Image (spheres, grey):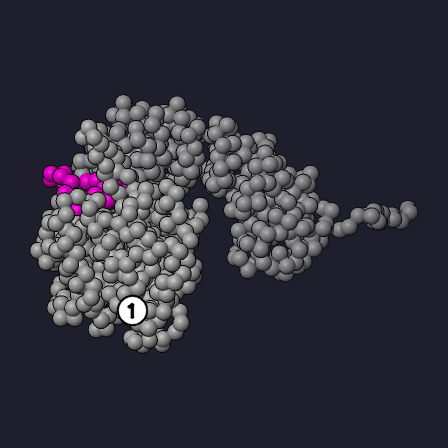
Amino acid sequence: MGKKVKKEAEPPPKDVFDPLLIESKTPATVVLMLSSPENEVLAKACDALYKFASKGDENKVTLLGLGALEQLYKLLSHEDPLVRRNAVMVFGIMASNHDVKKLLRELDVTNSLISHLAPEEDVVIHEFATLCLAYMAVEYTTKVKIFEQGGLEPLIRLLGSLDPDVKKNSLECIYLLVQDFQNRAAVCELNIIPPLLGLLESEYPVIQLLALQTLEVISKERETRILLGENKGLDCLLKILENNELSDLHVETLAVLGNCLEDVHILQQIQLTGGLKKLLSFLEVSTVPDIQKNAAKAITKAAYHSEIRKILHWEEVEKFLLSLLDTNNDEVKVAASQAISAMCDNIDSKCVLGFQGIPQLVQLLSSDNEEVKEAAVTALTNLTTASPRNTRTWSHNHLFQHCLGAAPFSHGYNVICIVAEAEGIEPLMNTLNAQRDGAISNAIAVLTNLSLQEPSRVNIQSQGIMSALVGPLRSTNSQVQSRAAFAVAAFGCDADARTELRNAGGLGPLVELLHSKNEEVRRNACWAVMVCGSDELTAVELCRLGALDILEEINQSTKRKNKFSEAALEKLLDNNLSQKYSRMGYLSSSNIITNGFYDCGQIKHGEKFLSLEELSKQELTDRRAIIFINAKPQESVIVENVQDESSSASGASSKEKARKGKGKKEEEKPKEVTEVAVTHTVQEEINPENSHWLPPPDFILMDYINDASKTILPLTSTREQVVALAQFVADKMGGSVGREQLHNFFWELDLSKIEFELKSNVVPIGKIKRGTFYHRALLFKVIADRIGIGCSLVRGKYNRAWNEVKLVEHSPKGLLLPPQEYIVDLMFEPGSLLKQGSAKADQYKRI
């Protein structure tokens, strides 16, 4: 029997590797496994990396450093579903890291991720692909890529997914994408409204919240608001407000409705269905600060449309806004005040808000919160401006009337009275020291509006408004500068106010505003200078600060000049006649020469204009003599120093001085007090620093004026007076001079002797016994102004000057003809009247 041979087992094929279980404890090893050709190894490696990355941000950074993302990116398009799913999961969990997102953008993974949103893909892939896109959509460049690569449509489709995480991630990604206006328009075209409204009924609050937040953003577009109305979205939103169990969604719901309020047609639709009344009723009982604040903000945005303001007024929205002013939340108070400002564009609303809300707003001016203070004073500005039934805004005509002393406007019981009765002036004055420029500028605006009524204006001035405006005039904010200058123009109509501003150092910063490049600031500064230049003392100080030079420069520019710059220049010169004659070479009949006037000749452009005191301190030179006028004895001037400064300022304007009536002697004229005030003003003009230097009195000139008053005033006609005065002046200045003897008159020699005798270039006009054209013309103008003869003084070339008078001729039939202009001959045939434009008149003007 043969031996049984044991059959040996066949060895495995040489190309088959026995299964090997590997346990790795380092992520680097797992990353290396991502290069394996085996699907099972790849799937397990991805799963291990997912778990590792889920443990913290540091692990994500570790994997980033090991180059895991580059390997995983290749697996996104792997043929095996499990490998592909696990790779997407790793991307989704790692994309929360900033550095990871940066590399993902460089790898341009968005296109691959969007392709994984297809319906046939696994729901887990949908979840983590949308999660990754949501993390990346924070960056603007990624938003653009998602839009360009068609990512919006699959994301909107996934809002209908059965998986809540897919819904949440897709919705969050869409919310981030619609922050860009291009995407907002695109989602509307893709009919996003129905799925969003459906998500409002989700059982997950986070999804409801994201849906509302997305609706809030996209409802900023009118097309979206229309779609909301067509899809009954407004009803859905109102139902949320009516459901107290959804109170955590009320704030966002109101935000969406607030956007809808900006559309007239949507608002009308809500009103017709009773939804607006429901909305306001809900708001009135709500005590949630965020709801109150957002509601007020929504009203503010909506109220910029006139039709919407009407609808809101019909629904008595003012009652709700006023109730918000009594809350304890500062943010709510700010929002309510801003809404009140917006509603003021409706006249009826303004009346309601003005009469009922001003006391509350005045109280808010004392708040420690600067933002509350600014919002409240802004509301007061809107309530007191441009309302026929409340007050009148400062128009150019109103201010001119106010400055001219016109009667105050009669408005009955209006908001100005309410502000005053609510004791609002003091807190408004305090607000001028606020930290916010908006609060300061609006406080100035309210005070300016209040100044329209005399009692309020007096009250404001008594609290030192001009001193308080000095700070705002120095502000760097153009609106504050503009309104401060405007307020100076409004309050500067009062002489005491001008004095206060001058003493407080406010003229300097006011003059600096003339340099402003802002047109409104420059215009209002010119306006203020024009008003402040109404008295000689202030006009001289403004000139000293360089206002004249700046105004001349402005008026030379066709772009920068305005009617106020021209009027300001004229006003300053009219109240500083010495400088006007020196610059312009002309004084009109309304420019009354007073004591302290001096003629220093034509000043060159850019040359400094010196005061009479400064000129008197110069040593004797061979330059042209300065002729000055002072027909007051020293004792009278000393008495004048005790006169009230405001009287001197108010009486100093040459245009406001009443002409003396014919037949009255100078000492009997009713304007004697004005004359005293003028002299006091001139004293100040001569020395703005209020020293006691005074020019010596000219007793000879006093005698001239007295003699002329006695001999010329009694004459019955103006023509006779002009002729007599011309002969009188010529007689005092050396008599008539023949044309051929003019070169032998030698007036220069006599004047040099007087200068040498006085040891000064400053000469009183009465000292001159041999005067030429410009001496005689000046003396004629001085005496004519004192006795009430209207005449102008014109400087010519080569020591020529002449006077122009207007006389009315009577025709034989007794008809009154228009006045004719004549030049008065004071030199060749004293008393001759040369008709303006005639050959003789032209010859008199030139050598």
- Determine whether 665 is above or below 278 in the image: below
Q: Which residue is most to the right?
A: 2
Q: How many marks?
A: 1
Residue 434, x across and y down, in percent: 27, 58
Disc 1 residue type?
A: Val
Image spot of residue 255 (x, y percent):
34, 38
Relative height, residue 656 to residue 395 (above, below):
below
Which residue in the protein does label 1 denote?
763
Q: Position of residue 560 (x, y in %)?
A: 42, 48
Residue 538 falls inside the magenta stretch: no
Magenta-colored stretch includes residue 404: yes
- Image quadrant of residue 261? top left
Between 319 and 373, the one lying in front of the other is 373
Question: Is any atom of residue 471 visible in this view?
Answer: no
Question: Residue 290 placed where, x, y %?
Answer: 29, 45
Q: Nearer the viewer, residue 200 or 381?
A: 381
Q: Residues within 10 Å of mark 1 (few under 14, many from 20)?
A: many
Which residue range is magenta in the image? 391-413
Q: Nearer the viewer, residue 655 or 229?
A: 655
Residue 800 occupies quadrant = bottom left
- In the picture, measured across the screen, residue 782 lies left or right of residue 713, that is right
- Is label 1 in a helix, a strand or a loop? strand
Residue displayed at 72% across by 50% down = 35
> What secondary structure prevails in the magenta region?
loop
What residue is drawn where x is 30% and y is 35%?
Answer: 303
Question: Is any atom of residue 151 visible in this view?
Answer: yes
**Picture residue at 70% right of the left edge, 55% below the top:** 32
Residue drawn at (37%, 50%) of the image? 844
Q: Nearer the viewer, residue 412 or 584?
A: 584
Extreme residue toward the left, this view: 668
